[in-house]
Image (cartoon, rainbow, N blue to C red):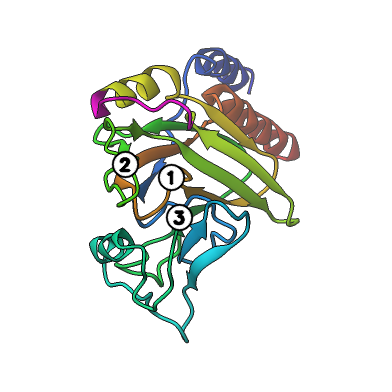
Amino acid sequence: MRKIFSMLVLLVLWGGLVVLPARAAVVHLDGIANAGWYADDLSKAHLYIADVDVPGAYYYKWTYSPAAPTPLWASRQGLSDDLADGILVNGTVVGNWRVESAGDVFGNPTAPVWKSLNLAPGTYVLRLTPDSRAYQLNAFLWSNESPSASLWNAYVQMYAVYADSTTQSFAFGDWSLHQGAESDVLDYYRQFVDGMTITLPQAAEVYFYINDYNAVDNDAGVSLEFSAVPLPASFLLLAGGLVLLGSRRRW
C-alpha cells in the first residue's frame, strides 16, 4: 500500500504540469441570420422602417408570426428599390428613414436570431476558429446612405440564462473597432481577444448573436470555438488517489 501511495504522490506532482484536453464546440454566426440592431425583441425576425425625425415612430413594422410569414418585400434589393422613391408599396410616404431588423428576414424568417449552447458550470475560453471570417457591416447600402469604405468586425454578443432564470451578459470583441479590411480585424481579434474566458457559476444556456448595424446590412459571419477550461490532471489524480485510499481502508 505504501508503494501505491508513493506512486500516486509522484503522479500528482507530475500531473500538476499536465492539462487534459477538452472537447470544443464551434458556433457559427451568419452575418444575416444571427444579427440585429435596434432590436426590441431578438426572439423573432423582424423588419422595421423607422422615422428618424420622430423618436419611436415607424413607417412600417413587420415581425414574423405564422399569421404574417413574409414582409412586403422578397429581397433586400426590392426593399431598397422601393425606398428609393420615398413611397412604399403599401402607399406609405417616407421621409428621413432608417431600416431596423433582426434575423434572416427574407431567407428564413422562422429561424432563430441566435445560436445557443447548453453548458455546465465552469470556466470557458473563446477564440476565433482558424477558418473564421469577419462580417461586413455595410455590405448593402440603402438608397439614403452615402457609399463609404468597407467596415469589417467580429463583435459578438453573448448572454447566459441560468437555471434559476438570472442572466449575465458577455461580449466577444468591441463593436467600436471597425476595420478597413477583413484581414485587419481578424488579426486584431486573434491577437487581443482570442483566449478570453467566461465563468458560469451554474448551468446555463448561453446565447450568441451579432449585434451590429442590422441583419439586412451585414454579410459574411464569424465562427467561434468555445471550450471548457479543464482541471489540471493533478486534481483528477488526487481525487483518484483519495478514492483508492478510502477503498483500501475498507478492505
Mark 3 or mark 1: name the one nearer the start of the chain. 3
In the image, what residue type sits under mark 3?
Trp
Q: Nearer the viewer, mark 3 or mark 2?
A: 3
Mark 3 or mark 2: name the one nearer the start of the chain. 3
How far apart are labels 2 and 1 at the CA level?
8 Å
Relative height, residue 112 to residue 183 (above, below): below
Residue at image x 49%, y 67%? Answer: 59
The residue that disc 1 covers is 213
Q: Nearer the viewer, residue 28 or 237?
A: 28
- Whether the magenta-drawn stretch holds residue 236 is answered as no
Image coordinates of residue 17 in percent, x first then y, are 49, 14
Density class for disc 3 (Cα within 10 Å; few <14, some 14-19, many ≥20) is: some
How far apart are labels 3 and 2 at the CA level?
17 Å
In the image, what residue type sits under mark 1?
Tyr
Q: Secondary structure at mark 2?
A: loop
Density class for disc 2 (Cα within 10 Å; few <14, some 14-19, many ≥20) is: some
Q: Which mark is residue 138?
A: 2
Whether pointer 2 and pointer 1 mark residues with C-beta atoms closer than 8 Å, the reply is yes
Q: Secondary structure at mark 3?
A: strand
Highlighted magenta segment, given as a residue range: 175-183
The residue that disc 3 covers is 97
Q: Nearer the viewer, residue 29 or 31?
A: 31
